[in-house]
Amino acid sequence: MANLKDKLTKLPKKPGVYLFSDSKDKIIYIGKALSLKHRVASYFSHRSKDPKTQELVNKISKLDFFVVNSEFEALLLEAQLIKEHRPKYNSSLKDDKSYLYIAISKDKPERIFLAKRVELKSNVSSWYGPFTTSSDARQILKTLRRIFPFRSCKKLLKRPCLYHHLKLCPAPCLALPNTYPETMRKIRLILSGKTANLTKSLEKQMKDAASTLNYEEAQVFKKEAYSLKALTSGWQSVPKEKQSSSKTFYELRKILTKYQGSDPTTLNRIEGYDVSNLGKDIIVGSMVAFVNSEPDKSQYRKFNLKYNLAGQDDPEGIKQIIFRRLNHPEWVYPQLILVDGGKTQLTAAFKAIKERNLEKHISLLGITKEEELIIIPKIAKQKIIAWKSLRLSQSSLILQLLQRIRDESHRFAHKYSRELHAKIITQ
């Protein structure tokens, strides 16, 4: 118990994995945490617990922990340790048929998919896990796929699917890129917990390519190395001038996960939308793009809605703008869409996203002008099932970011409507 009390006082507020052992020094539970201090302390609080958790707490005699840089690394380490120790109280291991693995097939080209233990048959070349929940395993694949696109379809299609248009699959149904075997090698290294080694290798390849004036190839290695560093670094490791931005995205992601049920692993691109009217003849819409919390005006878009609407109808205008925007997968899709308005505008926006079958890929928020409330639709089974109105402090960095995006979309839409008005007067 002395070890336990001593370790509890030394727990850091950092991501990591914790291990509980009983009086016989046998590991009985392994878990992960975004904040080791807060998560582990919750077991020993005076709040009521379910019988199973209370039974676990009564048997804890020793605590060990490992600090990592990110939630992603914590997920992988937790799976490796569970596989090695098979703790009694990790409920997903009670039934050998229930827990999930990430599997790589023997198919050519190789595909990556989730499988239960009983499904790891002869057609699987390698597997990683187990993962305590399906959401953990899916989050890892979702994150990896944005950096290293891979095949997931069981049967090759005759034409590219949505994942190819989202740049998440190299489309082996067309022609397999020569780089695909190397992509799979990198994915295996990451799933084996060798991310640091891979990052160093990519940085060396980047320098070698640059030294031979192969700048295009060097840029590819640079992007992969940067993405891996961002993935395996907590916001605390970011330079001071960027800490507030990184922490803002981290907190915003937690809000989306808690209230909307979505879990965007990254939030480096947010798009804002607004509608502006100057009489029945001038109805326009705007799209602004914020990349890493800064406006990228080269990616702004404007829409003339005069021929889409019978009259002034802001919700229908929002739907038309987003629908037309999503017709352009060559414009990189955002992880989050912000709409100027409340439930009515958000419902219209969701219809446009749903018509493109992107409701699982793009999160959605609204912000009202008068009360500055953040409106969050909770989405399940392809429909909005509930609403959450969130009032944040005016000093909140999340609110300030969303206000900037909302105000910029309003400014850009109003500017376009004035331009059209000036043309009409001139004519």
Image (spheres, grey):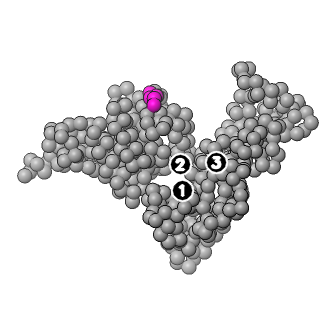
Amino acid residing under circle 1: Arg
**Relative to 278, residue 137 above or below:** below
Badge 1: few (under 14), some or many (20 or more) residues near its Cα, within 10 Å? some
Give the residue displayed 61% in from the left and 58% down from the top: 112
**Relative to 167, residue 20 above or below:** above
The mark closer to the camera, 2 or 3, is 3
Quadrant for residue 406, please give it: top left
Q: What stretch is highlighted in magenta?
A: 385-389
* Residue 40 picture location, percent across and down: 74, 33
Give the residue displayed 56% in from the left and 74% down from the top: 178
Q: Which of 66 and 58 is in front in this view?
A: 58
Residue on which disc 2 sits: 266
How far apart in space, not on screen, are marks 3 and 1 (Cα)?
Answer: 15 Å
**Relative to 256, residue 217 above or below:** below
* Residue 389 picture location, percent across and down: 44, 27
Residue on which disc 1 sits: 146
Badge 2: few (under 14), some or many (20 or more) residues near its Cα, within 10 Å? some
Amino acid residing under circle 2: Thr
